[in-house]
Amino acid sequence: MTAVDRLGAGTGDELRRSPYFTEEHEALRDQLRRFVETEIKPHALAWEDAGFVPREVLRRMGELGFFGIRYPAEYGGSEMDTLATVILAEELGRSTFSGVAITALVHTDMASVHVFNAGSKAQHARYMPDIIAGRTICAVAVTEPDAGSDVKGIRTTARREGETYVLNGAKMFITNGVHADLYCVAAKTDLSARPSQSVSIFLVEKGTPGFRVSRALDKHGWRSSDTAELVFEDCRIPAANLLGQEGRGFYAIMRNFQNERTVIGAMAMGEAQAALDLTLDYVRTRKAFGAPLWEKQAIRQKLAMLSAKVEAGRQLVYHAAWLDAQGAEATREVSMAKAYCGELVNEVMYACLQFHGGMGFMRESAIERLTRDARVQSIGGGATEVMLEEVAKRL
């Protein structure tokens, strides 16, 4: 079926569907939207207060196939592509509860990918079925107090002793860090090697002696996502818990940064669209000086321009994901998308909250939560400044 065939002969939304997506993609989008409307939006305010997403909700997402979109059928996956992941991120972003979105997306596209990409057949057999089913939730522990995007600068070490490794160090800002079951931990295994060849990744299970959550972190946004500081003190794990080859962890992390940044760009555009939708509804009903706010030309035109920018950002993300799905090198396009969308979502939130007036400043309004949640999108996964340097290298 060609892109033109998929567009069909209809009008309206049918004609505006992106040629990037197949009917299978659109069915996934419809399923996600139903899940968001029925199982996230009615309950997620309580999760904001609790500081985490209940495990039964994550298991339900696993049962529906959301955690196995790009994984093999033999483990319970759907064997779809990068564009399907973008749909997952975009629709979860549209939920207006970005803490829920990032909880799921770290599990699917930032942590468990390391298990699948570098894991042995034995590790796949042991972990992947439960990861895809939502019975085992993953976190990735790379960031440290003095090292974020600079992966080569991490200080956590893993020393080989016979058939074990001994981990020592600390990790900071770890999403899913409090309640995860399985952690993909980056550590230096050879301090004398070149920095890019000194990092390895290990699987550390919850409850391993010497590993603890030192504290849960209180955040500006993403309130329904649990975030932690982790400590490893003579944490002894089996040598079999090494993911892939020793000294290849830096390259594995760099490889997945492209996927992570695509996901964050898609999530940001979902958030931005949700904010615009909320604001359009609000300004068409909220009256000031005897007429709806929509009658003010300045407001109409600002929202029109922001809608155009969000459409541009969305297409940039779609194209980067399409390139990746074709196996093409897309670091430039992914870095552009992450930089552009991370900044744009904050521009959108600023204007949308402004047009909500005093109500936008109240905790009871969705736009207030969206605005807080969006701020980290220009930081997490690679700050805008880091992304622009990646683009500059490729100009």
Image (cartoon, rainbow, N blue to C red):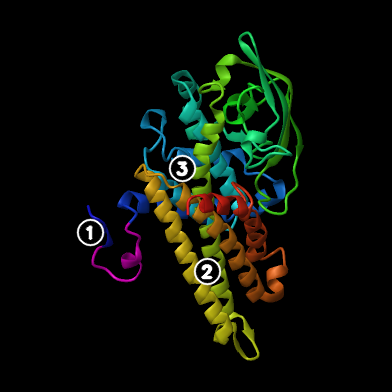
Q: For numbered disc 2, what is the local secondary structure?
A: helix
Q: Which badge, 3 or 2, comes first in the chain's sequence?
A: 3
Q: Is residue 362 above or below residue 20?
A: below
Q: Which of 378 and 39 is in front in this view?
A: 378
How far apart marks 1 and 3 lie (CA) works out to 27 Å
User: Which corner quadrant of the image does residue 384 belong to?
Assistant: bottom right
Q: Which badge, 2 or 1, comes first in the chain's sequence?
A: 1
**In front: mark 1 or mark 3?**
1
Left or right of residue 188, residue 146 in this image: right
Q: Position of residue 240 (x, y in %)?
A: 55, 16
Q: Where is residue 15 in the image (x, y as percent from the top left)?
A: 31, 67
- Residue shown at the point (64%, 51%) measured from the top left: 379
Left or right of residue 29, residue 184 in this image: right
The residue carrying pointer 3 sits among few (fewer than 14), some (14 to 19) or many (20 or more) residues within 10 Å by Cα, namely many
Question: What is the number of the mark on residue 66?
Answer: 3
Question: From which residue to which does the magenta span run?
Answer: 8-19
Q: Mark 2 points at which residue?
A: 277
Question: What is the number of the mark on residue 5?
Answer: 1
Mark 3: which amino acid? Answer: Phe
Mark 2: which amino acid? Answer: Asp
